Amino acid sequence: MKKVIMPAALLLILILALAGCGTGGAGSAGSPSQSDTSSESAASSQTSGSDSSSQAASGSSENTSASEGGLLGTFETTDLAGNPISQELFTQSDLTMVNIWATYCRPCLQEMPYLAELSDEYQDKMQIVGIISDVTEPEDETAALIIDQTGADYTHLLISQDLYDNYLSQVQVVPTTIFLDREGNQVGKVYAGAHDKAGWKKIIDEMLEKVNEA
């Protein structure tokens, strides 16, 4: 009987598929001028099973030195409802968990109910903010449906040219999650891929310790 040897490239694709989705735009988050918002329906993507807890850092450096405005720089965008948002958002909490996701990404949708629960449980210690990497216009119906179905009713920002140029152009996989302090500086590592509630809870507690020690 012939042994079937899986090519290394195919194995890597399968591993990434379990933890996160590749983004558009030649391997990075799609530019607002190019992004395609004709994504899959949230109803068919959202599942109730446990998501992948595999953990990969897309950037291994911790507490990176920041430019003006922090890791994401100075930016202007809106939330899904159309309200103007800038980097001043991060001053509202000692720690902000920024979850970059896309409407077509199944692992993103699977972890969002966990993030919704964590947002409530940690509301006195930190805030969670989503960035929708494939939506540029307010009141997008697909994104709104996803948020409604998953209960992830924390603030969600739309991708803007500022955010794309400052950081999102570097993002290779969604979901990607970063932690920022009040000045917008990175805390800890960059986390690429989805996690379950217990996995995120452990990471959040570690990040809170870091900002409290600073």
Image (cartoon, helix red, strand yellow):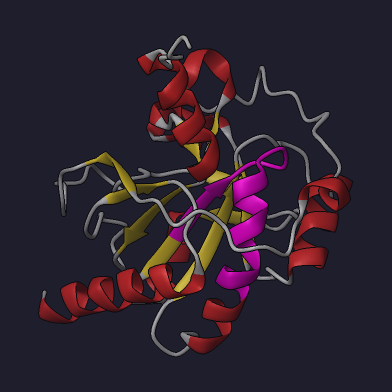
Left or right, 208 with reference to 52: left
73 to 203, vertically: above or below: above
Q: Is residue 160 magenta?
A: no
Residue 30 in sight: no
Q: How many marks?
A: 0
Q: Is residue 99 magenta?
A: yes
Left or right, 137 with reference to 105: right
203 to 24, vertically: above or below: below
Q: In the image as oriented, which residue stretches furthest toward the front?
A: 1
Quarter of the image where one finds residue 34? top right
Q: Position of residue 46 (x, y in %)?
A: 76, 54
Quarter of the image where one finds residue 179? bottom left
Q: Position of residue 187 (x, y in %)?
A: 23, 60
Q: In the image as oriented, which residue stretches furthest toward the top?
A: 2
Q: Residue at horizontal 37%, vertical 44%?
A: 72
Q: Position of residue 136 (x, y in %)?
A: 71, 36
Q: Position of residue 74 (x, y in %)?
A: 40, 44
Q: In the image as oriented, which residue stretches furthest toward the left?
A: 213
Task: Point out the image quarter for the C terminus.
Answer: bottom left
Residue 52 in sight: yes
Q: Residue at horizontal 50%, vertical 66%?
A: 196
Quarter of the image where one finds residue 90? bottom left
Q: Nearer the viewer, residue 1 or 57?
A: 1
Q: Residue at horizontal 48%, vertical 64%?
A: 89
Q: Which residues are magenta?
A: 98-116
Q: Nearer the viewer, residue 142 or 85?
A: 142
Left or right, 65 with reference to 32: left
Q: Nearer the viewer, residue 39 or 125?
A: 39
